[in-house]
Amino acid sequence: MTTQEKVLIADDDESIRWVLESFFRDLGYEVIQADNGTDASDLLGTVKPELAILDINMPGRDGLEVLKKAASGISAEVTTETTPVIIMTAETSMSNTIEAMKLGAFDYVSKPFDLAELEIIVGRAKEKRELQARLLKLNQKLRDREEDENAFIGKSKAMEQVFKAIGRAAPTDVAVLLTGESGTGKEQLSRVIHMHSSRSEGPFIAVNSAAVPKELLESELFGHEKGAFTGATEMKFGKFELANKGTLFLDEVGDMSLDLQARLLRVTQDGEFYRLGGKKPVRVDVRIVAATNIDMNKAVTEKKFREDLYHRLNGIRIELPPLREREEDIGLLVEHFMLRFPHELKCSAKRLSPKAHQALETYRWSGNVRELENVLRRAVLLSPGAVITEEDLELPNSKKRQPSLEEIITEKLRPVIERADHQQQHDLYDLCMPYMEGPLIRLVLEKVRGNQVQAAEVLGINRNTLRKKIKQLDINMKKIKGAE
Ligand SMILES: Nc1ncnc2c1ncn2[C@@H]1O[C@H](COP(=O)(O)OP(=O)(O)OP(=O)(O)O)[C@@H](O)[C@H]1O
Ligand SMILES: [Mg+2]
């Protein structure tokens, strides 16, 4: 059932309110009335009607004042965008009408009014309001999606440092230099910085210095005038101009030629540059976030990168740690991608088997988050069943890290502990420890072919202690392989 839409009628003339009330009732509206501007304004805020029709001449606050207030927003939820306002004028006073339209009235009717005309206006107001509501919803959806795509995941100590640095850097206009291995999330982070800056409403423009051919990079960055060079048949804006009032992300900045570095330095100093072939300087207000995965200090010493430019770009430096140094983040990233991919790839959701999970956590991710993302995407797309197995991941053996002793034991112990009834069980420690000691001593004895002197040495315990343990644990020396 749809709830009834509400209309606010504000007029000091009772007979007009009476006419309008029956008119709107017939249209299916719930009618709320006010006989003065102050009440009308309050009711807009509390009742949040879908439509308002206001007389201009009313005691107290007049209709135009109420409209003005509504235009700037009675509250976050009630504005002339959400609640179209129709103004009633007693005589066709042109100046009042113009004023009302300027203030954001949806339309006006002059008294005495023609109800058929009013009905058309009301119909259009309803259409506009519904369109507006749909747009708002759509925008919210887009924002949610953008936020999800730009989520920056991590909870490790190393990433905590990164988050702190973002918090410091984002609101300022200081240049940021992002360093870190390939795939650690430098570009993603540059978007996050933009989104959290005062420039978030402005553009975010990315240029990859390594991907654009050297001869084109200059015009890519600074634009060119018509006829600046052969082939320049049109004037073209450069990325610097496109990023005005926003953020320019300079990826692989370490690969830039010394010529371009000189030009870049000038923009960062003066906020001005010339388009190729241009005679007039162009002023821009751009925040630069640069990224590189080369060692910049080394590049500066080797004179491949200008020291002055390096200091300009290096306002705040954020180093992204490689994924293998923050294993705690792997699980979170996996969860994030497993939720995202079904939407992105338009396929059904899948689950990872416990073994697949473990394989992901112990793999050496030399390609960092990008490699993890790619492995998971492929598995989600190509695994035959709903559960992704370790084999589906197709991780090369060479980069699998051997799980540690603790990890192995933890995994083996887990089902035992899960089965234990914590209400009944009171001897889990005594129950489990011999099971750890037993296999340990038995295996060592096997390895040294039953030689107890050697076994005690390998274990690092006293020979007598070993003998006692063998007895206690009921280890049958005759069954030890290789022992005579
Ligand atoms: N912390 C993170 N949370 C979520 N996704 C991430 C994170 N870090 C990286 N990614 C994802 O991993 C992929 C690689 O990240 P990005 O392109 O930002 O890396 P990069 O450091 O710029 O790599 P390169 O130096 O190779 O250009 C992207 O798809 C990005 O969305
Ligand atoms: Mg990148």
Image (cartoon, helix red, strand yellow):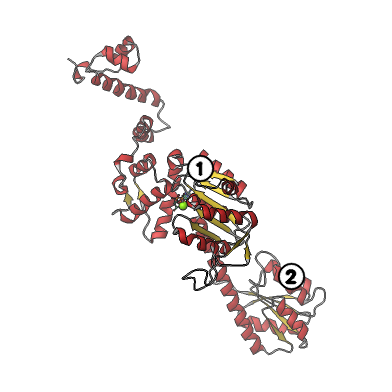
Task: Find residue 155 and name its label.
Answer: 1
Identify which amino acid the numbered label 2 is placed on: Lys
**Residue, disc 2:** 69
Closer to the N terminus: mark 1 or mark 2?
Answer: 2
Report whether residue 54 is seen. Answer: no
- Residue 444, percent across and down? 28, 20
Q: Which residue occupies the foreground of this view, 352 or 49?
A: 352
Q: Is residue 122 left or right of residue 260?
A: right
Within 10 Å of disc 2 (Cα), the crowding (few <14, some 14-19, many 20+) is: some
- Residue 464, percent across and down? 32, 9
Q: Which residue extends farthest right?
A: 59
Within 10 Å of disc 1 (Cα), the crowding (few <14, some 14-19, many 20+) is: some
Q: Quadrant of residue 87?
A: bottom right
- Residue 335, percent across and down? 43, 49
- Residue 183, percent across and down? 44, 48
Image quarter in which the C terminus is found: top left
Identify which amino acid the numbered label 1 is placed on: Lys
Task: Find residue 204 and name its label.
Answer: none
Report whether residue 344 is seen. Answer: yes
